[in-house]
Amino acid sequence: MNFLQHLECTECGKKFSSEKVQTICEDCDAPLFARYDLKRIEDSIDKEDLRSRYPAMWRYREFLPILEDENIVSLGEGFTPIHELDRLGRDIGIKNLFMKDGGVLPTGTFKSRGLAMGVSKAKELGIKKIAMPSAGNAAGALATYGSRAGIDVYVIMPKSAPEACIIESYMLGADVFLVEGLLPECGKIVEEGKRKYDWFSISTTKEPYRVEGKKTMGLELAEQFSWELPDAILYPTGGGTGLIGMWKAFTELREIGWIEEEDLPRMIPVQAEGCSPIVEAFHQEKRESTKCKDPETIADGIQVPKAFADRLILEAVHKSSGTAVSVNDENILKSSKELGRTEGVFACPEGAATLAGAKKLLERGSIEPDENILLYNTGTGLKYINTYTENLDIDIPVIDSVEEITVR
Ligand SMILES: *Cc1c(COP(=O)(O)O)cnc(C)c1O
Ligand SMILES: [Zn+2]
């Protein structure tokens, strides 16, 4: 049961065979999208059919690019919960505030979705060695699924990457190399390794299938909200695969008539003030972003100076009548504490940034108090113990006796 037809350049529309290993369109230097026979999907499955399926991202089998089930490499990822943030919503003045929580996935971040898919497809195509430059979470997820698939994994990370992600990758059997420098320097090494060691690079949007894994975030949102999506989705945007993937899901669901045009949500990328190329491009009404010169934020996952798929991100924002917002590190930290203390969610800084963004947009009038607003938490705070320790004044008393405790 498979409906994948071909791959298509997102810029010039040129078609590529999905039976061979593909990367990007060489003519346009642009990402490729998987295209499906949507008419046949529509004829072969009903929304209601989904209900009885296992609660993981693979329940959307018909919309995914894997040809044979035996190639699926899985740890049960997907179908993450949506929390109603009633108390927090009341505090900040949004009546219906929700959070989809990617922190509960294997590897602790939503990177699992893209890499479960990317590695499954690599396995199906017979790829034996995968390499990737990563700021952290993607490396851990690639190591995880590579290990399960029996594929050799090489990750090149900045020396400054979160320790949790470095050790995670190591413990999961990847060959890990640290580089003095940031992501672009790591990327250069991977490019050279492709020629020298025959590596397949699974770098963000330079491989067509990771985004199909991220697409399941959108499919889940639609199903979990009974096919009536929230008014706006705030998403912490770095390379942008998550936002692009969700929008691709909504477009496909719209095409087969499972959701209505007027139910399409506004897509809102949230970035850090110290690295906000997408937000700047949006406000300057540009189709493409300008590389951020001195990226600086505690939210590593969204510290991307120029997203390879920036045009696709901006296109999704425009088509959805969305907007874009940047927030500073101080407010990210504050919002993370609020989420923890009011709603029981220990979020990563990137996820917390969406709460800071919601407050700012409410003030600006870009979201209304009675709208349904969804915040996307991309990972657990547990992977950022170092970040929180280094950036917050955490003073936990050491005591000798009960007398020293002040009760609240
Ligand atoms: C990678 C990452 C992001 C950014 O994701 P994109 O979809 O590539 O923009 C956000 N948050 C966390 C925790 C990440 O690891
Ligand atoms: Zn092209």
Image (cartoon, rainbow, N blue to C red):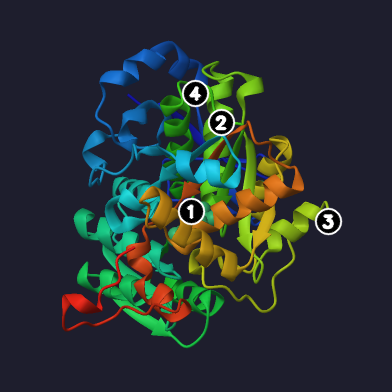
Depth check: give the residue in front, 276 or 157. Answer: 276
Tags 2 and 3 touching, CB below 8 Å: no
The residues tagged by marks 4 and 2 sit, at their Cα atoms, a distance apart of 27 Å
Query: Residue 241 location, x and y as percent?
Result: 53, 50
From the viewer's side, name the closer residue of 148 and 385. 385
**Residue under the point 66% across and 67% down:** 273
Name the residue carrying label 3. 284
Residue at point 35%, 81% (across, down)? 177
Disc 2/disc 3 C-alpha distance (Å): 27 Å
- Residue occupied by mark 2: 230
Q: Which residue is the extreme one toward the front?
A: 403
Q: Is residue 150 above or below residue 386?
A: above
Give, as a three-letter code, the residue at label 4: Asp
From this viewpoint, is residue 204 visible?
no
Which element is circle 3 on?
loop
Residue that mark 4 sits on: 37
Residue 243 coordinates in the image, percent (x, y): 56, 46
Crowding at label 3, few (<14), some or many (≥20) Cα neighbours within 10 Å? few
Q: State the separation of the CA atoms marked 4 and 3.
A: 37 Å
Work out which residue is located at the far left of the displayed protein and give it.
Answer: 401
Q: Which residue is mark 1?
A: 207
Is there CB contact under 8 Å for labels 4 and 3?
no
Q: Is residue 185 left or right of residue 159?
A: right
What amino acid type should be assigned to the residue bearing mark 1? Glu
Badge 2 crowding class, 10 Å Cα cut-off, few under 14, some 14 to 19, many 20 or more, is many
